[in-house]
Image (spheres, helix red, strand yellow):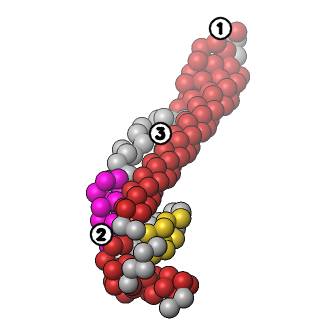
Amino acid sequence: MTRPNRLAVVLVGMLVAGIPAPAGAQAFVYPARGQSPKTQEFDRGQCYSWAVQQSGFDPANPRVAAPPPPQPGMPQGGMFRGAMGGAALGAVGGAIGGDAGKGAAIGAGVGALFGGMRRMRWAEEQQQQQQAYQAQQQGALAQGHSSYNRAFGACMTGRGYTVSM
């Protein structure tokens, strides 16, 4: 049997046996000592289990142990609350100046503007927190895959295979 045919037999055997190939960077395994397809299938399964145990990462069920980001509530009120507070403050200031209605209108506009700005700032902070959380999760998955691949490669090499990631 030629080398490419042996690799095809191993990959088909893995699919039939339900043994997942390492995720992420795929490992290419060559039987350097002429191991039979059945032995290759057995060794791959053993090394898969050993690599999961050693790395704490299972590429067939990738999970990372990181808590979800905190989700504080949206600021209450926003534009309307700011407008009402601004109108009240503006009415007091306007009454002192002689026109409470004009002061209330100006205060309402300024209050609504600041309330809207506060709400937008909150939304931007939430988006930044979510992006940071996603980056942390991706980094943890990449680290898990890397640890698993190193362990899997070490095991297969120890069993007489040439491994290329």
Q: What residue lies at 48% left-to-right and 44% top-to-bottom? A: 136
Which residue occupies 45% across, 87% down? 9
Looking at the rendered structure, the kind of residue marked 2 is Gln
Q: Is residue 14 visible?
A: no
- Which residue type carries mark 3? Met
Which mark sits nearer the N-terminus, 2 or 1? 2
The residue that appears at 44% across and 55% down in the rendered structure is 150
Q: Position of residue 134 (x, y in %)?
A: 51, 49
Q: Earlier in the sequence, mark 3 or mark 2?
A: 2
Residue that carries the numbered disc 1 in the rendered image: 96
Circle 2 is placed at which residue position? 46
Distance from the alpha carbon under mark 3 to that under mark 2: 51 Å
User: Are there few (<14), some (14-19), or many (20+) residues within 10 Å of tag 3?
Assistant: few
Q: Secondary structure at mark 3?
A: loop
Q: Main secondary structure of the magenta part?
A: helix
CB-based contact (under 8 Å), mark 3 and mark 2? no
- The 10 Å Cα crowd at callout 2, few under 14, some 14 to 19, many 20 or more, is some
Disc 2 versus disc 1: distance between alpha carbons?
85 Å
What is the span of residues highlighted in magenta in the rendered image?
A: 45-58
